[in-house]
Structure formats: structure tokens, C-alpha cells
């Protein structure tokens, strides 16, 4: 069955006849293809089409959500019925409901916001295999110590999102995504290391050349050979753009309106207060052309926008959907995000730390003795308290120079203090993913080793 | 949705009007003579989620997912395609895509399909499937938990409780003629309490579940126990001080801390990494990788456990696999592809998140067998160290073997006594080494309560872990104190 905005509206009409007072529908459909190459041979090819419809209904202040991948009309009728009967059983919540403002119909076409490159339909499996092979081969060429490969993967994804609600807001948009990643393995003196590099873009011709992706992956991998532990100490820590982005990702959890109204965020009550050093300015911007997190409307039909989250260290906004905004007596920031069968949450679009004036090499030069961290593992972040403790991999800095690689250590602190201690911000912001940061230097963290 | 309507035997014919003969024809047309092996994985899943916060079950959700995954294997190449429409037409399309990798030199002639089989025994028979239990009853359970947690201590300011209920039906058809199905019920109950005292906010979590019926939560007062544990942990953490940093002796409590085995050892023994020779455990079979006090098992056949399955997602019966015996590395966890390429026996560990994913070697329930030492003696033997009893998530770098996991409840040990609670302790170590430092193993083996989920390559599957109290002589603890 072919589904479009009109079908969505018809389903909502049916639900209203059954007593629903409000509701919305989100449909996500698309195609996903990926190839995996290892040691120059095809390892795995996958190809698929997916579609899911999510239905949310309100009976005054009670609500339920259902989703299905079964689009037969029987099944959809039963879905409406199930949703209605479930909604009547839930508690009445005075804050429940759709966004109050009506945004009308968007009818978003790809040109209105550049997120859709129709080459996603033309790129052939053969070209993807070639790209993956080339990237892996470049990694092997880069250094003889690259002796093995976990895999080289090329993926393309086409997504079509349709949204409609009973307040008259509706819209649909298409996105494309291309991604190439390589995970080489290096060996030396019985020690094995792997690292990886990737390029992910909405537009095919912006994707990094396969050879470049392979070379960076190889450089990052061989750099780890011979890694050792360091002594337990307190020292300055420089986060490379990848690990700094991961730190920003932790911050996003605490910024989410849902964490805040539940009392599960260390940022509760911090609006308009200094939470970071004056060098820190952070934006969330869902409108960046070709941005990986860009989209014209959020998962409740609210238009996306650019929001200043932190300005010169002062917290100026949280990330909000309409529910958490009402709970906090604020307005939605257009950050509603949801998988079709779940209630919306508030999540970042393109979330980034604005670049500073320092080159990454100047930042490293400023450190007498400290850590340059290139990978973090584990889940040691508590958004309620801000406690932060993660496994780290990196390179030791001595007299402003990168020296030997380190591993099997942890870095720990509290994110409240870490944000205040951001001493330097790099000029190397690159929109590689949804959450991005330039290189940053934190004055001092506890490093645990031997 | 009732049992009568949906069984592996009637699934295709009744719901989709497809008989196995036409499936056989569809597959044969595309795959005969071109591939070494092919299979179809049909799945129908109902998943309900109920969440309580601020004293209210604000919303209920139900997700219905169905689809078919088609896989073709030729040599070491895998072709995979799936569709969330179950029809002959879609199966044919998917089969065509999956067989794209076929070299034309395969040697399988598709054999006629046998009659639909069920696993020999059922590890998880239930009266009523989780998704058939009235929503009202499930909501009442969450309401009770909320009240009980708030009554535990006035400093408990918010309770987040969720109940996930799942009905999963699978049907696997292979080019070797195997046709086998299973119905897999699954519950998971999670409770998080947020405590607040003079602006100090802390949390505590606990939960449980498994392939069980709804009464499980009420038997042995389980839900009361879960609630108290979550509330107590939140209150305890209000008093917690910063964790000391550095290398020290650590005692891990029984049950959930078994996540150590999952991260440090289990992942590194999954066959795919060892076939590719990218695991830190590559080539260590028969070698000593742990102290002789350690015997590590992966067992998918423990009744009702979250990590248990009658058959894996390739139709292989699950089993008990010895990974490490008295310190010596014994075996790997296999799926079909890797077992064939490595010429090793199947272990029933080919698992997948859903029809949208090809299977890979995954753990089921992974645990350490008990020793003989009473846990009090283990704690008494430590002069200065850490006692960790509950953990959040963990992660491992398969290739260099380094793993981390973070404690959600831990205490200092001073002169053989458990003293002050500490917060945010992360442990980091080297997988192939860490079990060599196990110097004491308790007699109090426990499996976790049933909330574990393992992520690998973007796929999540339910798993279990278990362990007695153990002492590790020297592991790096990441703290700030």
C-alpha cells in the first residue's frame, strides 16, 4: 500500500471518529544498502527497504502510542483500535498534548533544505564495493605494520519522513546519507591495535576520497602501537575533535528537557548562569545545509532552527520538545525526536562547540606534561551528578610534543568543573557528525594508571 | 493476539497465506546451485512498553514488527536482504538481492523442506504471553512500585519505572531442509530512584525479568526486592565520596558484576573476531588465560533466563559451552558461517536483533562457576581496596583486549571491612590478563536478575551474566579522589 500525507490524515480522521481528541502520525520509510569488504574481498552485502508508521493518540490528557511495519488496511484499523483502548488506561497528565501552535503544511521539498542528494538512488553496489576496497588498500599501503583489517564498510541510506497531526501541521521530507569507514589492524612485537576512520555526508560528492579515509584510519591505528600505561596523576588533558564531540554528547543528555523535568540533570536551575569558561559557545542548528542532523521539522512538526545553547559560558537554552517545554514553562526549541513507536524525547540536531582561535598544534604545544586523548570507552558519565570517568587511549604530551602512545588508563572528573576548565578551544571544527567539536584543552583531570 | 492464532506452525499459512511448498520453490529458483547455504528468517514481534514517572503511567506504547530476512552464503561471502512485507513476491526479491554475492560455484542443491519442527524442549513455557496480560495489571504493578519506593525514604523524590513485555515468534527455513520455529516471551522491569538531600541528587537502579510469566514478579516478593534495592542504592549514593584513583585490590560482589566476564573474556571469544584474527584472544586456545580458580561458561539452556533461547537465530539448539576451564582457554562461541570457515562445531550462538540483521556469534548467559571461599573471608582478606556490587554498562576493545565497566554501587574496603560508599568508579583492565589476577572465588554464585542487553555492531540482544564474589589482585580504578 502506498502511503502519503493524505493517508496519514485519513487515519487521524478515523481515530477522531473513535473519540480521540488529538493525535499525530509519523511515517519513516526508506532504503538501506551496505557493503563490507575485508582483505580486498567482499564479506557481506545487505540491502533492504524499511517502513514504520507511528500513531500517537490523545483522549484529552491520556495518551498511547503504537507503531507497525504491517501496512495492510486491516492491520492499520486494528492499530487505531489498540491505541484507543490503551490510551484510556493511562494516567491523565495535564501537560500531555501536541504542540499548541499550528505550523500549517510544510510540503517540504528537497530544495527548501539541502538534505537530499538523489544520487543515493543511482550509486551502485559495484561502486560502493570499489570505494570500500580502495579505502582498505590505502590503509595497507600507508604503513607495513598494518597487517590485518577488521573491515571496510560503505553504506547508503535513503529516508522519507512523513508527519501529520490533528492541529493541521504536516510535512514530508527526504534525506540521503553516505558513509565510508575503515577499521585497520596493526601489529608490532606481539601487540595488536585497531582504530578506525570514517566519512559521513548527506551529499555524495562531499564524501572524503576513499584513499584519504584509509590513510587517516591507518595513521590513527599505527599511532597506537607500543601503547603503555602511565602513573596515576592529575594533568592537563587535550581532547581531539572525536573525543571532545563525545564529551558534548554527554552534555546533551543533561541538556535534554526530559532529564531536567525528571530531576535527572546536573543542569537543573542553571539557565542564564555561567556553566562553562567564557571561551565556550555552543549552538544547536537544525538548518545547516547538508548537515547530518538537519531536517526541516522535528518529530512533532515544529520547524527546526538555530538555538544558542551556551553563550560565552552562560547557559542560554535547553534542548526541548513541546512536552518537556511545557513541564519547564518554556517554549519548544524544535528538538523533538522519536522513533515511530515511542514518545518524543528532546535530542540535538547539529550540535557544536563554536571554533576558537587556537590551532590544534598550538594547543598541544601549550602542555608541559599531559594527555592527548583520541578514544574513550565505557559509559562512565552520570548526568544527574556530572560525575565523569572513562577509559582512555591517546598519546602522552611531553614539553609540548606528542611522544609515546598510552592505553589502559582512565580520565575522571566532574563535567561541571571540566566545562569551567576549558582553557583553549581549537579552530578545527569539522561537521563530521551530528555532534561536533574542535580540539579542546581541559586544565586538569585525574588520570588513573599504575 | 492469542496462542491459538499464532504459532510457528500456522504463522505463514494463516497470517500471510504462504505455504512452505511455495517458499521452497521461491528459494530454489534463485539459489539452487549458486550458493553454499541459504536461509530465511521470519519474525513477528509484539512489544509493549509502559513507563511511570512522577507517579504517573503517562503513556503506553505497543510496537508491531514483522518481516523476513534472506541470507545467502557463498564461501566467506554473505548476501543479506530483508523486507518488512511478508509475501512471496518480497521473498523472491530479497532472495535475488541476497544471491548477488553468489559466485556460481556453490555446491548446495536445495533439499526438500521437512515438516515444521519445534525445539526438543521448551525452556520458557508460560501460561499467558507477556503481551496478553491485561495492561491494567501491568500498570498496577508500576503504581505499587512507585508508592513503595517513595515510602522507603522521604528523600526519594522521583521514581522512574518501566515494564517492557515482548512476544517474539520466529520461523527459520534453511537450504538444508530445516524448518524450525520458536516463541520467545520476554519481560524486563527497570526501576530508577532519584534521591535528593540539600541539593545533592543521586540515583539508584535495579530491575529484573526473563522469559517468564507475569506472576514471576510477585513470587518471592521479587518486585518488592527490586524496588528496595533501587531505593537503597539511591540513598546510599547520597553519602558517597569520590572514588580513589589508581591500582588496587578489588572485590566484586555476586551476580551482575559478572559483566566483567562478558566484557573481558566473552566478546574476545566470539568466533568472528578469532576467524579474522583480530581478537586479543586469537591463537590462545589451550593456553592459560586465567587463574586455575576460574571456569567460565556460556549457557543458553538455563530455564527462564533472559539470555536463554531454545534455538539460536539460525535454528541451532543452544547448549552449555565451556570457554575457560580451570584457567585454560577451551573454546569459542560460534555461528554457522564462522564454524564452517573455522571447521569447528556449532555452539548455538548465532543470534540477531531482528529480521533486519544477519546473525553473528553472540553470548547467551555467561558466568563463572563458584569456588569454595565464603564471601566474608574474601572481604576480610583486603586491607585497602574497593568492593563493587552493582554496575552500569561496560565496553571492550576486542583487538587490544582493554575493557572498562563502571560501578553504580561501590564501597571502600578498609582493614577487611566494607566502609564508605564511593561514586563513579570505573574499572579498566586487559581481558587476556585480568582473570590471572583472580586470587579468591566465593561459594556464592548468582546469576543477574535479568536486565542485561549486549550491543555489537549495531545489534542489541538480551543476555545474562553471573558470578560468585571474587577478589582481583590489582586492577586500575578510575576515580578522582
Image: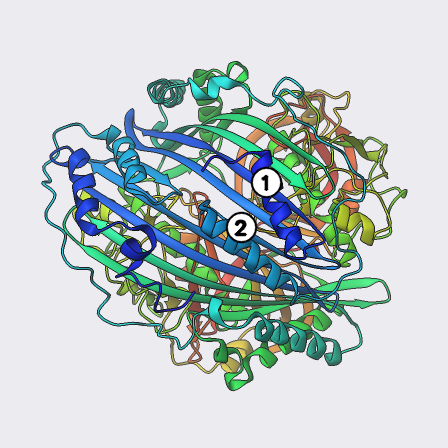
Describe residue A210's horizontal placement relative to residue B349 as left or right: right
The answer to which quarter of the image holds residue B205 is: bottom right
The answer to which quarter of the image holds residue B315 is: bottom left
Question: Which subunit holds the residue at mark 2?
Answer: A
Q: CA distance from mark 1 to mark 2?
A: 13 Å
**Vertical comparison of B90 with B18: above or below:** above
**Label 1, residues with CA under 10 Å away: few <14, some 14-19, many ≥20:** many
| Residue A338 visible to the viewer | no
The residue furthest right is A272
Rendered location of residue B301, percent (x, y): 31, 69
Can you say which quadrant of the picture contains the C terminus of chain B?
bottom right
| Residue B6 visible to the viewer | yes
Q: Which label sits on residue A67?
A: 2
Rendered location of residue A253, percent (x, y): 69, 47
Q: Which residue is mark 1?
A: A8
Give the camera-side residue of A445 and A47: A47
Question: Which subunit holds the residue at mark 1?
Answer: A
**Label 2, residues with CA under 10 Å away: few <14, some 14-19, many ≥20:** many
Amino acid at each position: 500500500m502506498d502511503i502519503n500525507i493524505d493517508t496519514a490524515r485519513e487515519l487521524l480522521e478515523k481515530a477522531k471518529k473513535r473519540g480521540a481528541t488529538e493525535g499525530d502520525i509519523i511515517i519513516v520509510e526508506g532504503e538501506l544498502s551496505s557493503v563490507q569488504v575485508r582483505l580486498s574481498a567482499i564479506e557481506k552485502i545487505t540491502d533492504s527497504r524499511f517502513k514504520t508508521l507511528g500513531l500517537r493518540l490523545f483522549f484529552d490528557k491520556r495518551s498511547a502510542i503504537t507503531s507497525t511495519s504491517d501496512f495492510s488496511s486491516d492491520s492499520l484499523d486494528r492499530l487505531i483500535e489498540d491505541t484507543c483502548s490503551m490510551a484510556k488506561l493511562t494516567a491523565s497528565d495535564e501537560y500531555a498534548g501536541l504542540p499548541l501552535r499550528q505550523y500549517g503544511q510544510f510540503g517540504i521539498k528537497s530544495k527548501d533544505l539541502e538534505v537530499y542528494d538523489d544520487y543515493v538512488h543511482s550509486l551502485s553496489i559495484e561502486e560502493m564495493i570499489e570505494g570500500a576496497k580502495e579505502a582498505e588498500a590505502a590503509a595497507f599501503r600507508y604503513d607495513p605494520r598494518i597487517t590485518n583489517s577488521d573491515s571496510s564498510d560503505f553504506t547508503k541510506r535513503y529516508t522519507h519522513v512523513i508527519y501529520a497531526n490533528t492541529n493541521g501541521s504536516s510535512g514530508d521530507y527526504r534525506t540521503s546519507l553516505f558513509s565510508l569507514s575503515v577499521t585497520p589492524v596493526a601489529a608490532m612485537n606481539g601487540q595488536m591495535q585497531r582504530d578506525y576512520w570514517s566519512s559521513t555526508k548527506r551529499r555524495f560528492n562531499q564524501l572524503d576520497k576513499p584513499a584519504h579515509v584509509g590513510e587517516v584510519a591507518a595513521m590513527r591505528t599505527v599511532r597506537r602501537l607500543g601503547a603503555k600505561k602511565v602513573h596515576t596523576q592529575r594533568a592537563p588533558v587535550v581532547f581531539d575533535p572525536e573525543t571532545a564531540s563525545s564529551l558534548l554528547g554527554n552534555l546533551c543528555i543533561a541538556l535534554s528537557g526530559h532529564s531536567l523535568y525528571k530531576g535527572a540533570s546536573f543542569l537543573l536551575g542553571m539557565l542564564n548562569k555561567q556553566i562553562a569558561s567564557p571561551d565556550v559557545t555552543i549552538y544547536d542548528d537544525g538548518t545547516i545545509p547538508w548537515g547530518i542532523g538537519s531536517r526541516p521539522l522535528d518529530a512533532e512538526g515544529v520547524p527546526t532552527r538555530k538555538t544558542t545553547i551556551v553563550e560565552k559560558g552562560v547557559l542560554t537554552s535547553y534542548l526541548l520538545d513541546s512536552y518537556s517545554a511545557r513541564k519547564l514553562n518554556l517554549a519548544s526549541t524544535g528538538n523533538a525526536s522519536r522513533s515511530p513507536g515511542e514518545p518524543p524525547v528532546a535530542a540535538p540536531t547539529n550540535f557544536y562547540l563554536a571554533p576558537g582561535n587556537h590551532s590544534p598544534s598550538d594547543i598541544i604545544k601549550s602542555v608541559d606534561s599531559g594527555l592527548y586523548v583520541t578514544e574513550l570507552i565505557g559509559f562512565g558519565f552520570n548526568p544527574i551528578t556530572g560525575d565523569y570517568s572513562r577509559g582512555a587511549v591517546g598519546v602522552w604530551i611531553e614539553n609540548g610534543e606528542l611522544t609515546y602512545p598510552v592505553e589502559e588508563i582512565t580520565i575522571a572528573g566532574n563535567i561541571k568543573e571540566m566545562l569551567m576548565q576549558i582553557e583553549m578551544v581549537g579552530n578545527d571544527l569539522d561537521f563530521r557528525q551530528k555532534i561536533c567539536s574542535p580540539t579542546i584543552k581541559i586544565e586538569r583531570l585525574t588520570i588513573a594508571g599504575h | 493476539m492469542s496462542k491459538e492464532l499464532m504459532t510457528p506452525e500456522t504463522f505463514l499459512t494463516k497470517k500471510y497465506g504462504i505455504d512452505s511448498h511455495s517458499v521452497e520453490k521461491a528459494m530454489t529458483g534463485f539459489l539452487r546451485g549458486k550458493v553454499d547455504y541459504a536461509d530465511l528468517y521470519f519474525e513477528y514481534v509484539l512489544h509493549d512498553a509502559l513507563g511511570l514517572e512522577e507517579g504517573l503511567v503517562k503513556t503506553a506504547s505497543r510496537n508491531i514488527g514483522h518481516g523476513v530476512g534472506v541470507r545467502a552464503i557463498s564461501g566467506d561471502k554473505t548476501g543479506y536482504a530483508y523486507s518488512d512485507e511478508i509475501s512471496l513476491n518480497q521473498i523472491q526479491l530479497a532472495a535475488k538481492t541476497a544471491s548477488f554475492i553468489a559466485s556460481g560455484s556453490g555446491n548446495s542443491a536445495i533439499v526438500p523442506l521437512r515438516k515444521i519442527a519445534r525445539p526438543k524442549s521448551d525452556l520458557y513455557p508460560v501460561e499467558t504471553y507477556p503481551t496478553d496480560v491485561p495492561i491494567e495489571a501491568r500498570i498496577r504493578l508500576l503504581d505499587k512500585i512507585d508508592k513503595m519506593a517513595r515510602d522507603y525514604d522521604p528523600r526519594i523524590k522521583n521514581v522512574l519505572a518501566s515494564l517492557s513485555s515482548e512476544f517474539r515468534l520466529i520461523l527459520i527455513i534453511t537450504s538444508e531442509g530445516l524448518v524450525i520455529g520458536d516463541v520467545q516471551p520476554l519481560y524486563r522491569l527497570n526501576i530508577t530512584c532519584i534521591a535528593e538531600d540539600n541539593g545533592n541528587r543521586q540515583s539508584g537502579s535495579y530491575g529484573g525479568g526473563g522469559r517468564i510469566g507475569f506472576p514471576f514478579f510477585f513470587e518471592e516478593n521479587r518486585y518488592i526486592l527490586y524496588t528496595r534495592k533501587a531505593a537503597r542504592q539511591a540513598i546510599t549514593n547520597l553519602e558517597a565520596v569520590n572514588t580513589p584513583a589508581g591500582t588496587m585490590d578489588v572485590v566484586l560482589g555476586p551476580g551482575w558484576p559478572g559483566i566483567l566476564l562478558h566484557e573481558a573474556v566473552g566478546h574476545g571469544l566470539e568466533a568472528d573476531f578469532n576467524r579474522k584474527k583480530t581478537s586479543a584472544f586469537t591463537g590462545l586456545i589451550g593456553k592459560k588465560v586465567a587463574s586455575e580458580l576460574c571456569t567460565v561458561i556460556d549457557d543458553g539452556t538455563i530455564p527462564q533466563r533472559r539470555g536463554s533461547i531454545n534455538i539460536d537465530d539460525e535454528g541451532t539448539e543452544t547448549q552449555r559451552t565451556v570457554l575457560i576451564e580451570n584457567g585454560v582457554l577451551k573454546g569459542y562461541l560460534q555461528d554457522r558461517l564462522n564454524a564452517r570457515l573455522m571447521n569447528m562445531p556449532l555452539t548455538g550462538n548465532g543470534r540477531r536483533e531482528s529480521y533486519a540483521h544477519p546473525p553473528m556469534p553472540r553470548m547467551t548467559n555467561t558466568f563463572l562457576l563458584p569456588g569454595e571461599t565464603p564471601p566474608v573471608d574474601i572481604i576480610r582478606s583486603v586491607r585497602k581496596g574497593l568492593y563493587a556490587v552493582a554496575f552500569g554498562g561496560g565496553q571492550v576493545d576486542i583487538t587490544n583486549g582493554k575493557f572498562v565497566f563502571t560501578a553504580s554501587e561501590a564501597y571502600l574496603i578498609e582493614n577487611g571491612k566494607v566502609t564508605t560508599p564511593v561514586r563513579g568508579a570505573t574499572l579498566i583492565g586487559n581481558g587476556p590478563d585480568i582473570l590471572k589476577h583472580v586470587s579468591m572465588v566465593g561459594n556464592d554464585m548468582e546469576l543477574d536478575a535479568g536486565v542485561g542487553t549486549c550491543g555489537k555492531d549495531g545489534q542489541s540482544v538480551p543476555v545474562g551474566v553471573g558470578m560468585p564474589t571474587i577478589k582481583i589482585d590489582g586492577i586500575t580504578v578510575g576515580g578522582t579522589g
